[in-house]
Amino acid sequence: MKTTLAPFLAAACTALAVVASCPVASADPVAATPAAPADLGTRLMHRDLDSTDSVPWSGPGDAPTVDFSVPGGVCSTVFQGSDGFPVALCTRYLGTEYGLTPIAPSVVLFDPQTAQPLASLELRKTGLLGGVYGYLDDQDRVVIAEGHSILRISHQVTDGHWELTVDERTELPDLGTTASIAGLAPDGAGRVWFITEDAVVGTVEADGTGRVTALGTGTPGGEKIANGLTPRPDGVSVLTSHALYEVASGGTGDPVVRWSRTYDRGSARKPGQLSWGSGTTPTFFGPDSSRVAIVDNADERPNLLVLDAATGDTVCTMPAFETSGQGTENSLMAHGKSLWIPSTYGYQYPSMSVDGESVPAEADFQGGLTRIDLETDATGQEHCVRAWEKAVKLDTLPELTTGDNRIWALSRDADAATVSVVGIDAETGEEVSRTRVGVLPVDSPLQLTGMIAPDGTLWQATATRMLKIAPGQ
């Protein structure tokens, strides 16, 4: 397959030379200089224990530089550990380790200076989300699922070459389901939580023992998982295709549902969403993270729901969008008492990644971004108030950097031939920077998740490349 892909990759390099220099392998990967030390904001898919998709530093700025590599697959999530080396959860176009396997999950380590792949480890293909929702532990190991196993994957130099190895493999006990694990998250007490694709949630203690409980057992046909878990101090917040659950570790260690709230899931999957139900991950915000927000999937106009994190009671609700496309598959950004919600309605995902037919069958992607604030009136009553809504098209999961108060994402340009990284003023919603970084279709952004490191570098994958978008000198 490497030989088959070589002409395409060489052609892609030539075509992309207008925006970045073609990749050159690192001559001495051992000597790569680590980037700025990472913190929690580079270890979790949604950046912190509240899933706010925000970090306390600045982004790549107005005139970033671009380096890239062609890793032979699509990388959905990027992490960075304390040594400064980016490591990504990727999907190879074709796996070979376990026979010829189309769309095979893998873990890829990148050189922090050149953006070149240093090592790759293919995993068994057991389910879609197991290769998407993982995290980086305090030893800089990728924690990811493979079937009903939890792997901890480290990177190190052996005989002068980087390699990725499975340090630990925890085989889970009988979960009462054959469905694969959809996602993993750590809680504030050090436990590992997991959720299967059919909504069996469980925890793994330090000794490897596991305890589980099934969610939505009274729902006809059951409930599905299509989003990530949000860690809590002693549990996780889980959004299924039907309801939001606050799950904690009980006195005996068994998972206990503290509260649950159903939501309007609509009558079908919308175009621009991957599954039937909410496309958001629970986002906690406000004083002491006392509020949790999601967007439902109501047919005509989806609603923003802000709930009391302790009880699940409604704090306020309002239509998520006015003029934007009426739906979202992306997580909400949050900071202080503000939420920023991007629209993905009509976005064209690869057909292999969506679950079921959408209604309507297709729609134009018009995009949109809105900011909604949680305000308190003179009587102490909290209200959802829309601050602004802008007609901006964001083609990747956006990230908020509070150091410069900007929102960053890739966006397809008006010429329909190029892709740029854009910076949006989080206070006003105005676009303040746009820098071309790629060409279509090889750089289709696919609503993938990037990572902004403490030094301001945005590591962002596209359909064929890994981009290193760094602050200019």
Image (cartoon, rainbow, N blue to C red):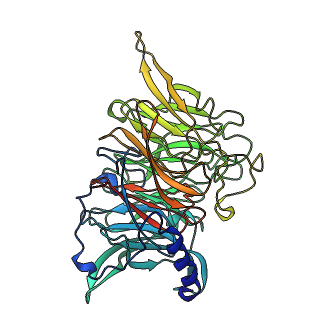
- Residue 335 in percent (x, y) is at 37, 36
Q: Residue at x 66, y 54 (%)?
A: 348
Q: Nearer the viewer, residue 71 or 337?
A: 71
Q: Is residue 360 visible?
A: yes
- Residue 141 in percent (x, y) is at 32, 68
Disc tally is 0
Q: Nearer the viewer, residue 120 or 459?
A: 459
- Residue 1 in percent (x, y) is at 57, 86
Q: Nearer the viewer, residue 104 or 85?
A: 85
Farthest residue toward the top? 378
Q: Residue at x 38, y 40 (%)?
A: 406
Against 23, residue 196 (above or below) is: above
- Residue 109 in percent (x, y) is at 37, 73
| Image quadrant in which you'd find residue 214 | bottom right
Quadrant of the rendering where the C terminus is positioned: bottom left
Against 236, residue 28 (above or below) is: below
Q: Is residue 205 visible?
A: no
Farthest residue toward the front? 18
| Image quadrant in which you'd find residue 169 | bottom left
Q: Residue at x 57, y 44 (%)?
A: 393
Horizontal side of 47 relative to 123 (left or right) equals: left
Q: Residue at x 52, y 79 (%)?
A: 10
Horizontal side of 44 relative to 454 (left or right) equals: right
Q: Nearer the viewer, residue 224 or 118?
A: 118
Against 376, residue 367 (above or below) is: below
